[in-house]
Image (cartoon, rainbow, N blue to C red):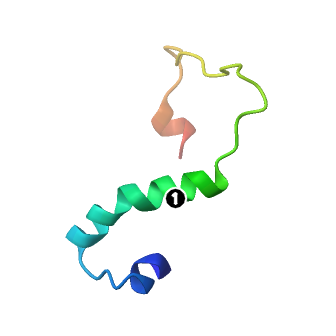
């Protein structure tokens, strides 16, 4: 919100237009490469219910 206020953006359309530039700037400042390239994601098992897990 502060970024939008500082840039004089007060509408949803204007904020949506500004979002790609803001995201690129934010990522350039704060993004870090992962320590490991290993992908720890795994398929969801048949007995796992995300609605129950994430509640």
Report whether 35 appears left or right of 6.
right
* Image location of residue 25, percent across then percent down: 52, 58
Q: At 48% across and 53% down in the image, what residue appears? A: 24
Q: Is label 1 in a helix, a strand or a loop?
A: helix
Q: Quadrant of the N terminus?
A: bottom left
Name which quarter of the figure residue 15 lies in.
bottom left
Identify whether 41 is placed above or below 16. Answer: above
Q: At 65% across and 55% down in the image, what residue appears? A: 30
Report whether 9 appears left or right of 26.
left
* Image location of residue 44, percent across then percent down: 52, 19
Q: State the residue position of label 1.
A: 25
* Image location of residue 52, percent across then percent down: 51, 37
Name which quarter of the figure residue 35 lies in.
top right
Identify whether 34 is placed above or below 26. Answer: above
Identify whether 51 is placed above or below 28. Answer: above
Name which quarter of the figure residue 26 lies in.
bottom right
Identify whether 21 is placed above or below 33. Answer: below
| Farthest residue, direction left | 13
Nearer to us in this view, 44 or 55: 44
């Amino acid at each position: 919100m502060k970024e939008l206020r500082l840039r004089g953006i007060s509408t949803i359309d204007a904020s949506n237009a500004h979002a790609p530039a803001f995201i690129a700037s934010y990522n350039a400042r704060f993004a870090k490469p992962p320590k490991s390239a290993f992908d720890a994601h795994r398929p969801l098992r048949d007995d796992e219910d995300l609605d129950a897990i994430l509640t």
